[in-house]
Image (spheres, rainbow, N blue to C red):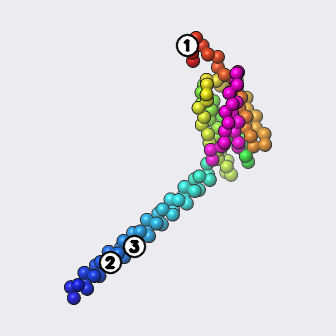
Amino acid sequence: MRPWRRRDRIFDFFRDFEEELEEIRDDLIRITEYNELRAIDEIEPLVDVIERDREVMVVAELPGVKTEDISLYISEDILRIDVDTTARRYHRKLKLPCRVRSDTGTATYKNGVLEVKLERREKDGSGK
């Protein structure tokens, strides 16, 4: 009878192993579904940065939002675009190619396209 008991233990091992694998599979499915929801939840908009002699223009695609839903944060060399509504969330933080004057920026939003124009900061004698 002893060999039968040993065989039962082996089958118990495989049964336990199979249950563990099923739990791991279920966890992976939950993690994947959660990440897919988060990916849909917040979108990084497509952005073009255009450098000109006197200004830097940033063009961002933000379809399906209203002008009042868009928040812009500008520093000397960073532009951050945030939109947070119940239907859509956009977020993008850009390192600008040069220093700009944050107090002179203008923004327009039309047909899902945001245009931000920022005046380039004059270089001083130190090359900044």
Using the image as rendered, state which of residue 79 and residue 53 is in the foreground.
53
Q: In whole angstroms, how far apart are the C-alphas of marks 3 and 1?
A: 68 Å
Label 3 or label 1, whichever comes before in sequence order: 3
The region drawn magenta spans 43-62
Residue assigned mark 1: 126
Give the secondary structure at mark 2. helix
Horizontal arrangement in the rendering, residue 67 relative to residue 26 (left or right)? right
Q: Is residue 66 above or below residue 106?
A: below
Amino acid at dot 2: Asp
Q: In whole angstroms, how far apart are the C-alphas of marks 1 and 2?
A: 76 Å
Mark seen at residue 18: 3
Label 1 or label 2, whichever comes before in sequence order: 2
Q: In whole angstroms, how far apart are the C-alphas of marks 3 and 2?
A: 10 Å
The quarter holding residue 101 reads top right
Amino acid at dot 3: Glu
Using the image as rendered, state which of residue 29 and residue 54 is in the foreground.
54
Q: Determine the residue positioned at 57% across, 18% down.
A: 128
Label 3 or label 2, whichever comes before in sequence order: 2
Q: Determine the residue positioned at 28% across, 82% down.
A: 7
Residue assigned mark 2: 12
Q: Residues within 10 Å of mark 2 (few under 14, many from 20)?
A: few
Q: Determine the residue positioned at 23% across, 84% down.
A: 3
Horizontal arrangement in the rendering, residue 68 relative to residue 36 (left or right)? right
Q: How many marks?
A: 3
Give the secondary structure at mark 1. loop
Q: Position of residue 44 (x, y in %)?
A: 62, 44
Verify whether residue 46 appears in magenta. yes
Q: Residues within 10 Å of mark 3 (few under 14, many from 20)?
A: few
Looking at the image, do the residues carrying marks 3 and 1 touch, with CB atoms under 8 Å apart?
Answer: no
Amino acid at dot 1: Ser
Q: Position of residue 36 (x, y in %)?
A: 57, 56
